[in-house]
Amino acid sequence: VDVGPGTYRIVDIMRLPIPHLSKILLTHFHSDHIGDLGEANTMSWANGRTKALEVYGPEGVEKVVNGFIMAYELDTGYRIAHHGKDTILPEASTPISKTIKFSDHNERMLCFETNGLKVYAFLVDHFPVKPAVGYRIEYKGNVVVITGDTKKTDNLAEHCKDADILFSEAISYELLNNMIENLKRSNLTRPVKILKDIQNYHMEPVVAARVAKKAGVKKLVYVHITPPLTNKATEELYLKVSAT
């Protein structure tokens, strides 16, 4: 789910079987969620993937996928010419976009089902990024939910209901506001504006915890943590202010 910058490098370091990659789920199209789409597609193909990669996302995904196809067109041609069509299959080089469309705001759409695995998408509120989605993944009675970037919505708890694990974004307004005050003293108006703006379309840790409790979630995992926790001191401060 999502392929921000550096995703492929992490996958490579972890020695995950990248040729087995068959599908990517995008929550929305901010650069920190799509930046490594080209590398994920190209390197999984160059390392042995034999079928086209499917890329799921809300409306707009076709435009994003086509943009990466165009950007990597020359690279793809070079690799085929160099290694040969029998080594890397041309038909597997071009990703296929799969647009998730909703007829109702509260709808939960089945994206695909395979070998007992079901992946659903639901709309979230990351305005002005619209549409944006979260995902609910079900397999043999186990449920994992990924919120994507969103603020709390009326139906979020319903989509997270009885999840074994909920991966929720968690942005600390208090830490950001501390940063804003420091920036103001240096008359840095641009980052002040940006740090204020991002607070109106993200979710605080305590809010995510309330959603998880209401939904009966077994385990809550914070991701997309903002600001980044670069050392033990900032981690402890984040946890302290998040608990209040």
Image: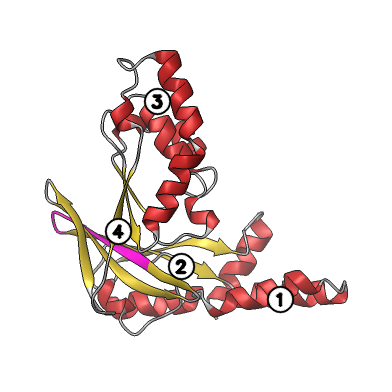
Mark 4, mark 3: which one is toward the viewer? 4
Question: Disc 1 versus disc 3: distance between alpha carbons?
Answer: 42 Å
> Residue 238 or 200: which is nearer the viewer?
200
According to the image, label 4 marks what residue? 99
Q: Residues within 10 Å of mark 3 (few under 14, many from 20)?
A: many
Can the viewer see residue 152 in this picture? yes
Residue pointed to by mark 3: 46
Amino acid type at circle 3 is Ala
Sort mark 4 into few (<14), some (14-19) or many (20+) by Cα contacts within 10 Å.
some
Residue tagged 1:
193
Query: Can you tell which quarter of the image residue 225 is in?
Result: bottom right
Is label 4 in a helix, a strand or a loop? strand
Query: Which label's residue is closer to the chain start, 1 or 3?
Result: 3
> Which is nearer the eye, 218 or 200?
200
Q: Which residues are magenta?
A: 133-141
Q: Please give left or right for residue 129 compared with residue 55 in the image.
A: right
Q: Residue flagged by tag 2: what amino acid is it?
A: Asp
